[in-house]
Image (spheres, helix red, strand yellow):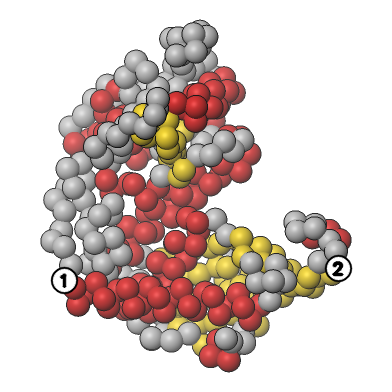
Amino acid sequence: MTSRKGRARRNSDCTTGGPRPALRGPHRPRRVEGTEQAFVIGVLTNAADFARARARGVCDAPDYERYLADTAELLADALERFETVRARMFHPQDFAEFCLLHGLDPAEPAARDRYLVNPPLQTQLLVYQGEELAGDFLPRLVRARENGLTLCHADLLLDGGLYGGGPCGGGPDGGAAPEEPDEEHARWVRAAYQRGSEVFRRMLVGAGAGVYELRLRVDAPGGQLTASARVLQWEDGVVRVNDEDLELVCAVLCAGLALELPAVAVLHGSQGTAVPGAARGGAADGHFRPAAWAWSSAGPDWAPAARPVRLDGVEAQPGYSLGTVC
């Protein structure tokens, strides 16, 4: 095909529908000065998924390396032509089940279009801003899929209270949407979400500056809700955490608190500060020490764990009281 700039380009992408590598979202299209509103693409995140997709006739790239190169070019071109560029992991098994559920032919571009913009899967979308595709962005797409499934599980437990019958609540492609939750129910969920956000904030404030990872598990009906987030916190209290990870942590904390489910959390990593004058991100010049704290919850509040905890292979001692952290 030929782009608007006139250069010839091979399009080996297997996840966008139609003859051009553009797929608008389900909202009403809106144009802004010389550009279209949104571009959505599904990305195969590993060679095994690529092989399965190619075997099923939904991808024509000769190999995974060429596929990644072509996809990176599509994304770069989309950034120039579209106001918003979003991506999500293209999971061959998810796609096959989606087509079976809706009676679609997997080889048809329209089937891939519907799969990409399926309302219950909108939580899996990430905004692409020019990151290196083969760097951190592919792992983030994998995590976004896992996070999205967990968000939908949490939303289901809360009767649609997280999204108000939105992305996880069904719709034209995802089945019948539930009724909008009443205002009292919505207030109850919002209050639990705010309490969950405050729990996370107090964990970080008490830890102080450092590089950490939070691991969280809630024992819920239908299976465990799990979340994790990597956090970089500077001396002045500024925190860096991926938006999608923050959303998941707060949602899982919300579900656990609202439904008073058994839960455990571990915050671990390197506690300390950079040497005076060191630039942010220059952890190698700082003074750090290992740290790991654990908390548990069996009701409406979180407290230091009663005993040492081992979660996902990480051992942690009972944490500090969150009630004493401002």
Q: Is residue 28 left or right of residue 195?
A: left
Q: Is residue 131 left or right of residue 236?
A: left
User: Which of these two is toward me, 14 or 203?
Assistant: 203
Image vertical order of residue 17 relative to residue 308, above or below: above
| Residue occupied by mark 2 | 276
Specify few, some or many for label 1: CA neighbours under 10 Å numbering under 14, 14-19, or 20 or more.
few
Q: Residue at x 48, y 85 (%)?
A: 302
Image vertical order of residue 164 relative to residue 204, above or below: above
User: Which of these two is toward me, 59 or 2?
Assistant: 2
Give how far across and how far down residue 110 sits, in percent.
25, 25
| Mark 1, secondary structure of its residue | loop
| Residue occupied by mark 1 | 182
Q: Does any portion of residue 54 appear in the rendered image?
A: no
Q: Residue at x 26, y 67 (%)?
A: 161
User: Which of these two is toward me, 161 or 183?
Assistant: 183
Labels in figure, total: 2
Question: What type is the residue that disc 1 sits on?
Answer: Asp
